[in-house]
Each structure stands twice: as structure tokens, then as C-alpha cells.
Image: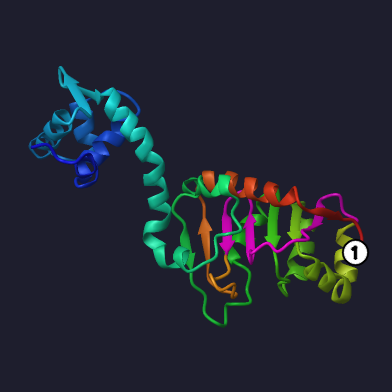
């Protein structure tokens, strides 16, 4: 009796990994064994199951996906990527507001890859992420979407600007008002620089902070109840940077440039 296809693929890590490996084309068995770090006697029973379900075929000790196997694995790969993003930090993702992500990017959230949850103490809660700050000084540009005014902004943004980092900031009318009321001298001077770009987004964003430089994407999300949370996610996968850029571009379309305070 044949197994359900879901069991064939997901119930065995060896079978699943072999199919993922064959997605790029036919492979000799010796290469498959080496890449999967498994002995032939341990893998052959799993290969037989894949062959019996018409997912894999082999000839002269070279194996490849069947048309059915290729269709299944092509559909499965996006799901596996999404699971990889969420599986180790299910509690964080499940308890934080994700409604700020437009549908076309939410469907592609797998592209950010596996991220690291950064848990802060109360003492650290008013600090900017030091790794992001450090690498921003090594970056050509820094992009930020923020709905709150961090007390270190008036210090760190001028430092970045002096070092030649191109700054692009989308924020709320409330934050613009804080800049105007308490820090007009600092941000007024920054606005004279060709490498400082400030924008206001008139609608509710549902974001605490999303920022990216040439190295990291930082996601500091609100909880599902829209409460502030000091913990955040840090992603370094190259796909995360492109995903962050497209998110920034999405909010840029609804923003207006600020040229003076």
C-alpha cells in the first residue's frame, strides 16, 4: 500500500533532502551520499520509496526528479522557506503585528531567511542595536521606517551623515513634530545635506522600526495589541536586504518629502 505523498516527503528527512538536492538536476548516487552525509544502505530504502511513488527515477546510479517530483518540489520549496523563517521563533512571530506587510511581500516573507531574535534587558532597551550601528558606518546607505523618536537619533544621524552614509528616513507626522519642537537645529542642518532624505507617512503604519543597511535588516515590531516591544529580529540573509528595500519602497510611495522644519 502506497503512503500519502505528504508522508513520503515530510516524514523522512533523508527523502526530503534528496528531493531538494535533485531540484537542481540529476546527481550521481556517490555525490548524493556525500552531500547528505549518509551511507548507501541507509539511503537506498528511502530512494525506493521515492521511486515507488514516482517522485524520483534512477539509471546507471544517477538519479533525478520525475516530472511529478519536480512539480511537487517546486511547490514545496516556498513552503519550506516560509517554515524556516518562522519555526525557531514561532512565539515572537505569532505574538507580533504583521499587518504592516503588504500582501505581495507577505507571500515572499521566506526571502528574509532565518533571523536572530535579539532580547534586550531593561537597561539596554533605550540603546540602538550596536551591530546595526557599527555596520551602518561601513555601508553606503541606511534606510529607516520608524514610528517613534529614539533619543539617540539626534546624535547618531549626524555622525552617519558626516561619514558619508546616505540616510533615508520615513516617519510619522508626530515624529516630525518632535524633531521640529525639540531638535530643529540638528535636523534642520541635516536637511541641508544632499545625503539626508526625510519623509513623512500620513497614515498609521503599524510599525515600530524597520531598518536596513548593506549588512542587516532589523525588524522591531509592535505586539498584536499594538504595544511597544524592546526585542527585535535581526536578519542578514541577502534576500532579506532586497525584501527590506521593497518594503521601504512600498511606504515611500505613500510618503511626502520633508525639506524644512
The one nearer the camera, 61 or 208, is 208
Q: Is residue 236 left or right of residue 255?
A: left
* Label 1: how many Cα within 10 Å (few below 14, some 14–19, many 20+): some
Q: Position of residue 201 (x, y in %)?
A: 77, 59
**Residue 198 falls within the magenta-colored stretch:** yes
Q: Is residue 155 left or right of residue 63?
A: right
For disc 1, the marked residue is 188
Quadrant of image for the C terminus: bottom right
**What residue range appears in magenta?**
192-220
Q: Position of residue 92 (x, y in %)?
A: 46, 67
For image coordinates 20% across by 47% down, the residue present is: 11
Asked which secondary structure carries label 1, the reply is helix
Q: Position of residue 44 (x, y in %)?
A: 11, 34
Quadrant of image for the N terminus: top left
Up/down of 19 relative to 106, above or below: above
For image coordinates 34% across by 29% down, the residue present is: 71
- Residue found farthest to the bottom: 123
Q: Is residue 75 left or right of residue 228?
A: left
Amino acid at each position: 500500500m502506497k503512503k500519502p505523498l505528504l508522508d513520503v516527503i515530510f516524514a523522512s528527512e533523508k527523502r526530503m533532502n534528496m528531493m531538494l538536492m535533485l531540484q537542481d538536476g540529476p546527481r550521481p548516487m556517490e555525490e548524493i551520499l556525500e552531500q547528505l552525509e549518509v551511507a548507501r544502505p541507509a539511503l537506498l530504502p528511502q530512494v525506493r520509496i521515492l521511486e515507488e511513488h514516482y517522485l524520483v527515477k534512477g539509471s546507471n546510479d544517477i538519479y533525478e526528479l520525475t516530472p511529478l517530483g519536480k512539480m511537487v518540489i517546486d511547490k514545496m520549496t516556498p513552503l519550506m522557506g516560509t517554515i524556516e523563517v518562522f519555526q525557531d521563533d514561532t512565539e515572537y512571530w505569532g505574538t507580533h503585528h504583521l499587518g504592516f506587510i503588504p500582501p505581495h511581500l507577505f507571500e515572499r516573507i521566506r526571502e528574509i531567511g532565518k533571523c536572530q531574535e535579539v532580547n534586550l534587558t531593561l537597561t539596554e532597551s533605550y540603546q540602538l542595536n550596536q551591530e546595526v550601528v557599527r555596520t551602518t558606518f561601513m555601508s553606503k546607505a541606511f534606510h529607516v521606517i520608524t514610528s517613534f523618536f529614539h533619543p539617540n537619533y539626534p546624535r547618531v544621524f549626524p555622525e552617519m551623515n558626516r561619514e558619508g552614509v546616505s540616510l533615508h528616513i520615513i516617519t510619522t507626522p508626530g515624529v516630525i513634530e518632535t524633531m521640529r519642537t525639540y531638535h530643529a537645529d540638528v535636523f534642520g542642518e541635516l536637511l541641508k545635506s544632499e545625503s539626508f532624505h526625510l519623509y513623512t507617512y500620513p497614515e498609521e503604519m503599524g510599525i515600530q522600526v524597520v531598518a536596513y543597511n548593506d549588512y542587516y535588516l532589523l525588524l522591531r515590531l509592535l505586539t498584536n495589541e499594538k504595544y511597544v516591544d524592546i526585542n527585535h529580529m535581526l536578519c542578514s540573509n541577502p534576500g532579506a536586504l532586497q525584501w527590506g528595500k521593497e518594503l521601504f519602497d512600498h511606504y515611500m510611495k505613500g510618503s511626502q518629502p520633508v525639506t524644512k522644519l
